[in-house]
Image (tube, helix red, strand yellow):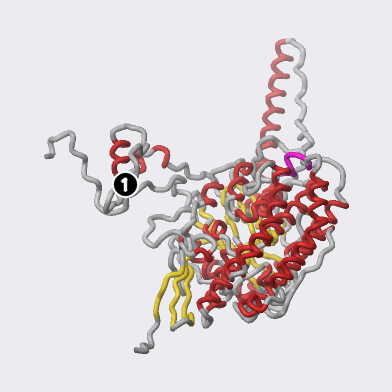
Amino acid sequence: MFKNEEMEINMGPQHPSTHGVLRLKLKLDGEIIRHCRPVIGYLHRGVEKICENKTFFQGQVWTDRMDYCSAVANNLGWAEAVEKLFGITVPRRAKYIRTMLNEYNRLASHLIWLATHALDIGAMTVFLYAFREREAVLDLFEAFCGARLTTTAFRIGGLREDLPPGFEKMARTFQARFLACIDEYETLLTENRIWKKRTIGVGILKADDAIAMGVTGPVLRAAGVPYDIRKAFPYAAYDEMEFAIPTKPEADTYARYLVRLEEMRQSHRIINQCLDGLPEGPVMAKLPKILRAEVNEVYHPTECPKGELGYYLVGEKGSTNPYRFHVRAPGFINLQALPMMVEGTLVADVIATIGTLDVVLGEIDR
Amino acid sequence: MENNPNSEPETQAGPCAYDLKAAPNRQVVLPKTVPLPSLKLWRAEQEAAAAAEAAKWQKTLADYEAAKAKAEAEGKDAPKPPVRPVAKPDANDMKFPAPAPATDPDLLRLQEVLGDKVEEAFQQAGELTCQVAREAVQEALRLCRDDDALHYEMLADETATHYPAAKDFAFSVVYHLTSIRRRKRMRLRILIPDGFEPDTATTVYPTANWLEREVWDMLGIRFSGHPDMTRILCPEGWEGHALRKEYPVLGLGQREIDFREDRSGMLNRRALEKAGFQSLNLNPPKAE
């Protein structure tokens, strides 16, 4: 009756908690996971190949479709990588607006993470609350560029348009109420007994393992490593901003939750600084109509809400297209550490661990 | 049967029977240049350009002298002397970051320890690049991680580029290293011919596992010593490597698939397509 043998099951790719089309091959001993192998690629569209056959201006549109929860951060990475490749200087006002929108994007991304992560674990209410605020952020994107999800917000060399009239008022209204909203989520979750039982001590990834596996972003910071590309290798206007890097030593799911909530507060702080100190001036650099590359290669890392988003570009002399384009997707690298985090734990903890890694399969599969 | 003109020609055996010539939109224009960023190549190019310009100017001068002599002989007015063209100042906010010789202590340290194994080291656009001999890649990676003066504890990215126009190599493989403690980044590069299997980086940086699987999947470079050299984004059994330059953007084409049942009307649609009709399925889907 009690047979001691391992059972192999597939989790996904149609499982609702896998956030898209992630498939995990699990080997189970009872309810304990002995082996886990992620299988990805179900959403592979060949973005890199496509971008190599598009011009530098057209390529940005494809970056929206990679990490669709943080399209603005992807746009920023692309725009800055191309600017680095060509040596373009961006006006200061454009840098500030980019920084502000990037932080709004971090809020939107973290809110959708909080909503779905809590929903996976069983806290339904947070989902509705977080989406309420996310709507307000998406309204801001809509006011700025007309799109809510696939923004293509920036242009190479700056911005297409300055901020629309009334944007600052909208932003200030949001800023005035957002901190109270974070406190509201905290009243629902932080001291919630069920939440703590489901997250404390679950999905542990210690600092040494995280660095060896290349894990970045809030997952690394929740292991106590204060590595944030906004501070370590500043880009956009982050060198002029004051903010803290929240870290926690526990390296579990609960610590990552606290780190991300604190990051939202810091983003709020950065946005306030951007709104207060917004310099006057043009928002677009003077550029030729057609950008023709020289032989050059750049790797431009940015701090996407999920971690280090790196764009690798190689330019060919006289060509309007990148010769080679590669994305270092944070989700791709972070997901690699999943087996390390779940082996030896229970099946229910896999759900919490996938949620805490904040995977978006659009960028993992590209 | 063979004389019947309506019978379809038999498709070639095997799954690789793609007729790329019959599909003009799948034909590929291979790149003609080798855009390998390098200080040596850049300098050679600059010198060649300067020499070409000087030669052009000399020719203009010679032409002028000839025209002048001719005009004097014919008793006409001498032609205007030529003016050497001056490059117009660029009004754009754009300055190409030219490669510069290595002055960073990290690159010097690598050169000092690895000696001849460092083929080239230069800086461009604020990034450090060190090209090492392809056999020494694991040694260089280990040195970067373990040396106290270097201490690159994280591998941020690993990828490769296909250069079909190059003569003595086919791919460049680049490793982007990050030092969290020292806030520095560096790029290691090796150049390999087609078919060469470089040593895996997974023994030094476990991150490289999936990255090298991706390189194998997309560019067809196998890494020797890799624990799990399988495809990652494309399914097993996929033909070709999509990010090679000879791979068409539209893909190699659709394979014949045997549908057990024509539930979605796919076969019907294909038959219509072959007959020259628009590929729209106007029939309602069949019930399960």
Kindly identify the residue that appears in the image at 74 percent across and 56 percent down.
Answer: A103
Indicate whether residue B106 is drawn in magenta.
Answer: no
* Residue A75 locus on image (x, y percent): 66, 50
User: For residue B177, what is the image quadrant?
Assistant: bottom right
**A327 or A38: nearer the viewer:** A38
Kindly identify the residue that appears in the image at 55 percent across and 47 percent down.
Answer: A52
* Residue A226 locus on image (x, y percent): 74, 72
Label 1 marks a residue whose chain is B
Furthest toward the top, the residue is B75
For the magenta stretch, what is the residue range?
A157-163
Examine the rendered structure and indicate whether residue A64 appears above or below residue A357.
above
**B142 or A349: nearer the viewer:** A349
Report the residue marked by disc 1.
Answer: B286
**A2 or A233: nearer the viewer:** A2
Quarter of the N terminus of chain A within the rendering: bottom left
Kindly identify the residue that appears in the image at 63 percent across and 49 percent down.
Answer: A149
Examine the rendered structure and indicate whether residue A363 appears above or below residue B95.
below
